[in-house]
Amino acid sequence: MIQALILAASLISAATGTAPEASRPASKPASKSSGAEPAFDSTRAFRYLKEQCAMGPRDPEGEGHRRAIGYFTAYFKGLGLTFAPQAFVHADMATGKPVPLTNFIITVPGKDPRRKPVVFCAHWDSRPRADQEASEMLSTRPILGANDGASGVAILMELGNLMGKKPPLQTVYLVLFDGEDYGREGNIEEYFLGARWFADNLPAANLDYVLLMDMVGDKDLHLPMEQNSLKQSPDITTQIWARAKSLGLSQFEARPGPSVLDDHMPIQAKGVHAIDIIDFEYPAWHTQGDTPDKCSAHSLGVVGKLVASLAFRGLP
Ligand SMILES: [Zn+2]
């Protein structure tokens, strides 16, 4: 993903910063209201993060990419969920070389057919180069993508675990995007390749909303409201952050954060609500240092708990 620009928070905080909290009905503490909700296991999620990294970089032309396809297939099929690869070929914009890419769509039927389905998604590929490294030797090699890739997918995997045992409120599509981070710096057209393909081939005509998780594993987790999400879907974004507050998840900060171009943008362009949960303040971003030791089970647990709450309780 790319940071488009940072607006002074004060410019829009008056419009978006405080109203949602004030207008939410008094929320009960999660510990009292979520008895029927399966607990998100952050230790297990962190293991999924490390297992992805153990396969090596998952850049589209790497060996780890091929291994990860087998890994995800075995994992989600093992849960007994409907699992569909969405394969397509991208022509590299610089060389014309065909690059095979694969999204994965896992469908979990919900209890309430009157509610529209939701999508929870993350990118599973890792960046083929480490642009933020100063040395050429390091910058031309693919990155491990512990936070930038594996973190969001680790949460989706654990959610699959939970929803394999208990159906969510509304139908959930867990979607793993390929080719998010393929683009060379300066060419935005070659990012979000899987999300673009997905946006052109949505699994349902009417989606409630799409929730993207990217870079959610940072040990030092801060999750302000991503500005493109807030701009397109102010109600859903503020409801999600209000839910986090009601769960006592202080890492979700109800203030506008950076404006980030990410996998939610091609989906927003189709007129579908799409919200990005992202911590863009990550020193190891696009470096060889994006490794599991920069991430924590606790951070995955914070975001996982929120998304599990959305899956099993829905939004108002
Ligand atoms: Zn990235």
Image (spheres, rainbow, N blue to C red):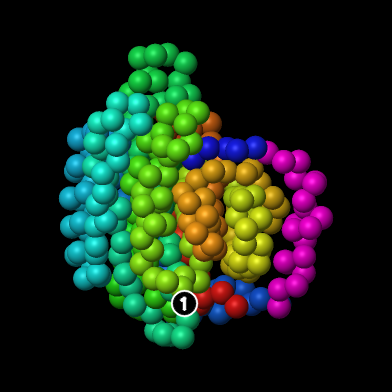
Above or below for 122 versus 82: above
Secondary structure character of the magenta stretch overall: helix
Q: Name the one closer to the observer, 36 or 213.
A: 213
Q: Mark 1 points at which residue?
A: 116
Image side of residue 19 versus residue 173, left or right: right
| Mark 1 beta carbon near ligand 1 (under 8 Å) | no
Residue 36 x/y as whole percent: 45, 81
Stretch of the chain drawn in magenta: 6-25
Q: Give the residue displayed 29% in from the left and 72% down from the top.
A: 164
Q: Give the residue displayed 41% in from the left and 50% down from the top.
A: 196
Queried whether the magenta region covers residue 22, the answer comes back as yes
Residue 142 x/y as whole percent: 33, 28
Looking at the rendered image, the quarter that the C terminus falls into is: bottom right
Residue 187 x/y as whole percent: 47, 31
Label 1 Cα neighbours within 10 Å, binned few <14 / some 14-19 / many ≥20: some
Above or below for 220 versus 26: above
**Total numbered circles:** 1
Mark 1 element type? loop
Residue 78 x/y as whole percent: 19, 65
Above or below for 287 versus 225: above
Q: Name the one closer to the observer, 78 or 170.
A: 170
Above or below for 34 versus 258: below
Q: In which quarter of the image is residue 157?
A: bottom left
Q: Which amino acid does label 1 sit on?
A: Lys
